[in-house]
Amino acid sequence: MRIHFAALLLVMAVIGCKNPGKSGLFNGPISPTLSGAWDGTFQMGGSTPTMSMAITQSNINIRGDYFAPALSGVTIGNEGTVTGLTTGQSFNITLTATTPGCVSKIDVNGYNAGDELAFNFSGVDCSCTTVSGQGYGQRP
């Protein structure tokens, strides 16, 4: 009985040292959530359009909406949906325009540092022009 108790204490100590402050067995680092409001800037060519998003994350699934005002002929649609997946601090989302007459679809992959995002994107804008670049976001 004493050997079993000693073994149990040893296992608990190892788990506690591996993940101090975490609850549950064998938890890894807690990943930051994408849920909430985000403001961001796209950098493409000489333009820096802005965008805001409202995202809900459930497990690894991401859903939400975006709003992006038109900027001198470059637009990804004034509004649309956000769908995608996140694993750890990485995320892959697709921005699909719901603005009438716009067929924009942008694929975004990036890194979530908690209150800041860094990402790359590529796709087509409302005029069916291929766009790509990088961007940054933060919580408002």
Image (cartoon, rainbow, N blue to C red):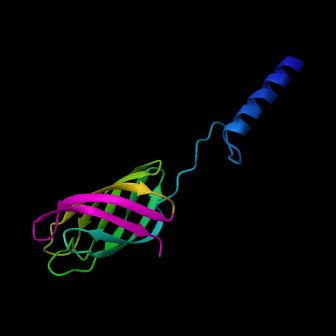
Q: Which residues are magenta?
A: 115-140
**Where residue 76 sits: x, y (%)?**
21, 70
**Where residue 63 sits: x, y (%)?**
38, 61
**Where residue 91 sits: x, y (%)?**
39, 53
Asked if residue 129 is among those painted magenta in the image, a careful observer would answer yes
Name the residue at the front extreme: 46
Residue drawn 46% across the image and 64% down it: 116
Instruction: Name the quarter where the N terminus is drawn.
Output: top right
Residue 121 falls in which quadrant of the image? Answer: bottom left
Residue drawn 84% across the image and 23% down it: 6
Majority secondary structure in the magenta region: strand
Please determine whether, in this image, residue 20 is positioned above or below residue 82: above
Residue drawn 27% across the image and 68% down it: 43
Q: From this viewpoint, is residue 137 visible?
A: yes
Q: From this viewpoint, is residue 1 visible?
A: no
Task: Please state which of residues 135 and 31 is positioned toward the viewer in this rendering.
Answer: 135
Asked if residue 71 is among those painted magenta in the image, a careful observer would answer no
